[in-house]
Amino acid sequence: MGLLQDKIVLVNGGSQGVGAAVARAAAREGAVVTVTGRRPGPGEALAAELADAGATSAYLRCDLADPAQARGSVEAVVAVHGRVDCLVNAAGLTSRGTLLDTTPELFDAHIAVNLRGPFFAMQAAVADMVARSAPGAIVNVISSSAHGGQPFLAPYVAAKAGLAGLTRNAAHAHRFDRVRINGLNIGWTDTEGEDATQRAFHGAGDDWREEAGRRLPMGRLGRADEIADFVVLLLSDRSGVVTGSILDWDQNVLGGLD
């Protein structure tokens, strides 16, 4: 029996990067997995990959910037499977902007994807869990930048810090409903999206990962599959009664000074 055997799991933003790694890990642990994303190509390919490996899986096209679609992602899973046991909010917008050059449009885009989408997906998931008087688990993929971050991540930090606060608020509000809600403040991670961001915004070449690794304590970037293992643990009963916890999944120590 896997850690998530027969659990109905929805991974929003699950068609690539950390979300895709979570979907793979959840499927290996016995879950029935639905992944969402804006691009059908990667999403359908991942669902087919999981199915070929013996899992029950599906892809749902969804733009989480639209609150109706965020709620609808949960409602679609409930319509097919009768319930949702676990929700992972892994979608993320990482486009750059400082306090001085961020436009209202860029700010609103970050809030829409990084905060509002998770809010309304959680709303729908918790509503289903409460209506069934059933336990459930939610994990929000946040960011170590929520503690302050780099100057060029101003709107991203604002949204992710909001998601950290929302995680604690919702966990507190629904602890007696036995809905556990936790988050991961992830550090610098090697994903397809990060590769595209480094090339688009920082002029990175093919060796940017190696250069980054030389500046990091462990000599390398974090990996999406490592994060996925933490997420699966937090979703599973093996994490016990833990709720409202936001784990700093990073190799730099908050508050540590040289």
Image (spheres, grey):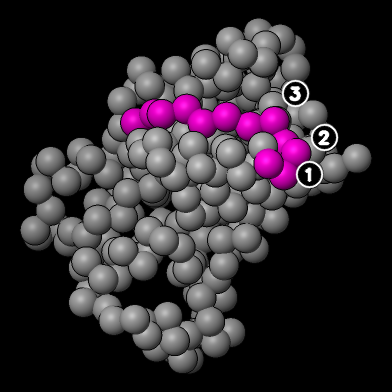
Q: Residues within 10 Å of mark 2 (few under 14, many from 20)?
A: some
Q: Amino acid at mark 2?
A: Gln
Q: Which residue is mark 2?
A: 5
Q: Nearer the viewer, residue 189 or 42?
A: 42
Residue pictured at 48% horizontal, 67% vertical: 189
State left or right for residue 13 relative to residue 184: left
In the picture, residue 127 is in which quadrant?
A: top right
Tag of residue 107 = none
Q: Amino acid at mark 1?
A: Glu
Q: Nearer the viewer, residue 49 or 201?
A: 49
- SS of the residue at dot 1? loop
Point out residue 194 in the picture as x, y percentages from the top left corner.
38, 64
53 in the magenta segment: yes
Q: Residues within 10 Å of mark 1 (few under 14, many from 20)?
A: some
Q: Are marks 1 and 2 in contact (CB under 8 Å)?
A: yes
State left or right for residue 196 relative to residue 229: left
- Is residue 197 something that shows in the picture? yes
Total marks placed = 3
Residue pictured at 68% horizontal, 41% vertical: 52
Q: Amino acid at mark 3?
A: Pro
Q: Which residues are magenta?
A: 52-63
Q: Earlier in the sequence, mark 2 or mark 3?
A: 2
Q: Which residue is mark 3?
A: 135
Residue pictured at 47% horizontal, 39% vertical: 43
Disc 1 versus disc 2: distance between alpha carbons? 6 Å
Tag of residue 29 = 1
- SS of the residue at dot 3? loop
Q: Residues within 10 Å of mark 3 (few under 14, many from 20)?
A: some
Closer mark to the observer between disc 2 and disc 3: 2
- SS of the residue at dot 2? loop
Point out residue 125 in the picture as x, y percentages from the top left corner.
57, 21
